[in-house]
Amino acid sequence: MADFDEVMDFVIVGSGGGSMCAGLAMRSIGKEVAIHEKTNLIGGTTSRSGGVMWIPTNPFMARDGVEDSPEQAATYLDSVLGSTDGVPGSTKERRRAYLTQAPRMIEFLLAQGIKLTRVKEWPDYYDERPGGSKLGRTVVAELFDANELGAWREKLRLSFIVAPVPATLEEMMELPMLKRSWAVKFLLLKLILRGVLARITGKRWVAGGAALQGRMLKAAVAAGVTFRTDSPVSELIVEDGIVKGIVTVKEGRPWRIGSRMGVLINAGGFSHNQRMRDRYAPGTSVKWTMAAPGDTGEMIEEMMRHGAAIAQMEERVGCQMTLPPGAEASEAKPTAQAMTASPHAILVDQSGVRYMNEGGSYMAYCKAMLERNKTVAACPSWAVFDQQYMSNYMLAGTLPGTTKPQRWYDEGYLKKADTIEELERLLGMQPGVLAATVQRFNAFVSQNRDEDFHRGERAYDGWLGDAFHKPSMTLGSIVEAPFYALPVVPGDVGTYGGVVTDEFARVLREDRTVIPGLYATGVSTASVMGRAYPGAGSSVGPSFTFGYVAASHAKEQRVDFTTRHAPATVPSAALETAGS
């Protein structure tokens, strides 16, 4: 029998959203639970993200009169995700568990005092598919005053989404239209007043993922969850195939912790591990990620060492980005999600050919870049746009119409030319190719129909564009000199593959038997969403949900994993009692 320095009821590795949710669920029945975070900050990539959860049939949709049903959501998921063949993380049972448990998880969080709501319009990424929602299924946290965390405030990892004024995620998404809308000008005035009031009252507002995880951290600390930072886990304690605990570090020496009810791994993916990238996602770079620095993959490999199956390892939560001089070393890299989906802009490969619908899912966008790169150099690709774009839209984090840093031109990051032909020369393209591409695109604009890639034919394409641009929110001619180009790379906010888990979040072996005592969620696992991204929050939502599912299942166990063998069967009512 293993010797332990300490024994807990439930041990969690990593401090992302699923960890917080599981910790709260365990504390709701009085169980002792500890969350171990290897870095000095709490929140994981969830904190750094927009903090959005994709939750079908969530209570805020009903509140706002937005139509949805389990059947509609299932139809949509099946349409987008396709067959379950070859995607062990996205079985029918896992999809069904997600659709059933995700809204229950939200109800549980609301009961714990977590203030959540929805963005009034954030279309599903394939809203034109059967069951798709044009208004969206997103859930976000309300703006949060980090001062409510007290001494824990400095332990919260902040979001990469930063605004010059305290704004919700929804408000921040409106700010780029400042020059286009009086309503947004009034919104800015409101936000400035909010900022002044915050200074007077001493509030420290955070939004996005920091707001979500800030609220979760506050609730978890109040509930009695134990948090340990700078507490890396080096190995799982396994006897006779049963996971009985973890080995971490305390006061400079190994510290062995037993876990009676199981161990939950939510330690992120491998975005910051170039060796694993080269093996599973060749052609991608650690320089292109915005994942939290703790995403180095060692816990996936540790689970593999004990027989865990892995799947979908080549998949990532793509996030197209552009890297101005100096940006590679920054954690907050400029995204390019809306750039080439806005009017007066397109994306072309290095030969000057357009090859995709520049709107739509950022995951699909980056996958298309990597696929194109197999036959034509496309990493990086070039965003091509004109002065109309420069005057009206943000560029690499800078406001519309502002003078761009001279360094961008001097170091060749931002190309500028008086003609498309000159731009071709600057980009090293064969003469006439880019000119023909732009001419063809402009013809599509004149007829308000993209015959090649159907950009603008779904609500999400338009949502990424400009609501004030008519007749199309996303199609606009590239005709006004000077003309510009800058590089776009297939970045990411996290990997999307990992260990295979079942509908109860239990880790499985290659033969699909359960590894007793071991649960996993988040991007440490092969995603329930398979190889697609149905809507905003398709990574964070499952992390929370399967963290909740893992805790709900563990609460039903009648065996102490530190002393006895695991049961061979699962109580059939395990998930029906979730949150009880």
Image: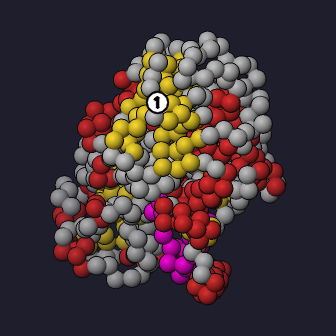
Where's residue 432, x and y in %? 24, 58
Name which quarter of the figure residue 391 lies in. Answer: bottom left
Q: Is residue 319 visible?
A: no
Residue holding disc 1 = 4
Looking at the rendering, the stretch of residues picked out in magenta corresponds to 157-181
Residue 270 in the image: above or below residue 246: below
Q: Nearer the viewer, residue 261 or 273?
A: 261
Residue 368 in the image: above or below residue 399: above
At 70% from the left edge and 56% from the top edge, which residue is drawn? 114
Residue 111 in the magenta stretch? The answer is no
Amino acid carrying mark 1 in the image: Phe
Where's residue 137, x and y in %? 68, 49
At 54% from the left edge and 31% from the top edge, which residue is drawn? 259
- Please state the total of marks drawn on the protein image: 1
Residue 172 in the magenta stretch? The answer is yes
Q: Nearer the viewer, residue 1 or 530?
A: 1
Left or right, 348 with respect to 227, comes to left
At 33% from the left edge and 57% from the top edge, which residue is drawn? 488
Magenta span main SS:
loop
Left or right, 512 with respect to 503, comes to left
Where's residue 128, x and y in %? 63, 45
SS type, badge 1: loop
